[in-house]
Image (cartoon, rainbow, N blue to C red):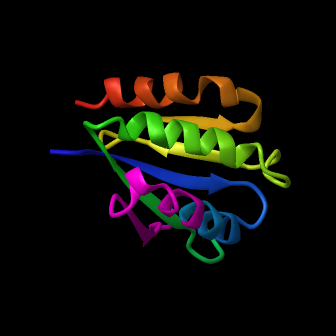
Amino acid sequence: MDTELTLSIIGADPGWHMGELVRWLRAEPELRGKITVTDAVPNPGDMGSLVELATVAVGGGGVLSVLATSLKTWFAQPRHSDIHIEVRNLSGRSVIVDAERVPDVAALLQAVLDADG
């Protein structure tokens, strides 16, 4: 059974950036069919529109490595330097991935997965 990681955008215009990120990730052959998009549930007292979440089913076959490499490349594109991605596992543990920590994306994702359970 696959483990899931949930991705959400932190920064300016999260809905637009999430759409762009999902299109980017779905272009990866190894990630096709492993990404679903849902609306986030707002916290009590939050105002504004709901932000979409992308859920990625990761497990065997190197999917985690492909996801990490794809995120690293996505951050290298123009206009992503001020964007952060929160990655959360099924048990709620999360890390923030950003352009400044791009070399450590795989290690950060693995740390979140290792904490699941």
The residue shown at (45%, 33%) is 65
Q: Which residues are magenta?
A: 23-42
The reply to whether residue 45 is visible in this rendering is no
Could you tell me residue 21's position as x and y percent?
Answer: 61, 60
The residue shown at (37%, 41%) is 63
The residue shown at (43%, 51%) is 6
Front residue of this view, candidates 59 and 43: 59
Front residue of this view, candidates 117 and 59: 59
Residue furthest to the left? 1
Could you tell me residue 109's position as x and y percent?
Answer: 47, 31
Q: Is residue 65 above or below residue 3?
A: above
Q: Is residue 83 above or below residue 12?
A: above
Q: Is residue 55 above or below residue 74?
A: below
Count of numbered tags: 0
Q: Is residue 102 left or right of residue 38?
A: right
The residue shown at (74%, 55%) is 11
Q: Is residue 16 above or below residue 82?
A: below
Residue furthest to the front? 29
Q: Is residue 33 magenta?
A: yes
Q: Is residue 69 magenta?
A: no
The reply to whether residue 31 is visible in this rendering is yes
Q: Is residue 81 left or right of residue 91?
A: right
Could you tell me residue 60's position as x and y percent?
Answer: 25, 36
Res 22 → quadrant: bottom right
